[in-house]
Amino acid sequence: EIVLTQSPATLSLSPGERATLSCRASQSVSNFLAWYQQKPGQAPRLLIYDASNRATGIPARFTGSGSGTDFTLTISSLEPEDFAFYYCQHRTNWPWRTFGQGTEVQIK
Amino acid sequence: EVQLVESGGGLVKPGGSLRLSCAASGFTFSVYTMSWVRQAPGKGLEWVSSIAGSSNTYIHYADSVKGRFTISRDDAQNSVYLQMNSLRAEDAALYYCAREDYGDYYFDSWGQGTLVTVSP
């Protein structure tokens, strides 16, 4: 089973700064990787699918990149509403739906 | 607008059973794969189970629930269910209903969740 490892566990930044989140797979997942945002008390929201495609309604400041084993979610300029938890998820092989442990983006 | 509304959570003793429901609206329910994803308090996301839409026939379970949980759907009622038996303390979590899209296996819409507590 492929394991996804996200880093850092916590990212402390100020509004307006650039956020770079990492997700590393224990073996290649090709480009079959998604990113989700979860704010406290809310359900997750799909941001990016297939590594670099923004889901419907997702602002352009969210960019996904990478392939194989190394992936990045970049938030170009943090808005106040972007401070949240972020999870990656792959769909390469069984069980087809595995999440990373998450990265918290918190206000510095 | 896609809406998913879960219900059925509550307090149950270890070894007990619970049936979760998810009522869907705002889309053609029958064609979509539907899933349950859970989140223990203060923890990350864990996929639980999925049931395919009309174009496919699979049912998938996470190893942690296989043999104890059963997923089902009623396309006439636009609903998906999760029957949970032999509940354990580690099953305690917020259970989300989610729709899969973008080629399946990605969760593009989520409900607000229903809380399951397992305690003596």
Image: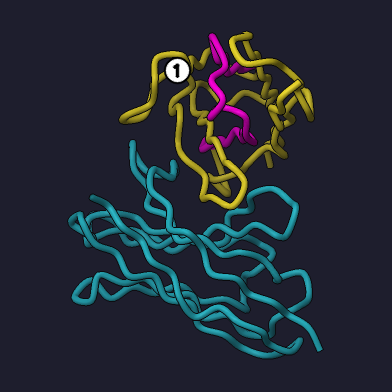
Chain colours: A yellow, B cyan
The answer to whether residue B69 is seen in the rendering is yes
Task: State yes or no: residue A83 in magenta.
Answer: yes
Task: State yes or no: residue A76 in magenta.
Answer: yes
The answer to whether residue A66 is seen in the rendering is no
Residue at label 1? A52
| Residue B39 place in picture, x, y as percent | 65, 57
> In this rendering, would A69 be left or right of B22?
right
Helix, strand or loop status at disc 1? loop
Q: What's the residue at 61%, 17% (across, down)?
A: A71
| Residue A15 place in picture, x, y as percent | 62, 16
Residue A12 vertical placement versus A46 (above, below) = above
Residue A69 vertical placement versus B47 (above, below) = above
Quadrant where the C terminus of chain B is found in the figure: bottom right
Q: Which residues are magenta?
A: A70-92
The residue lying toward the viewer, choosing from B101 and B42, is: B42
- Label 1 marks a residue whose chain is A
Q: Quadrant of residue A55?
A: top left
Q: What's the residue at 34%, 38% (across, down)?
A: B103
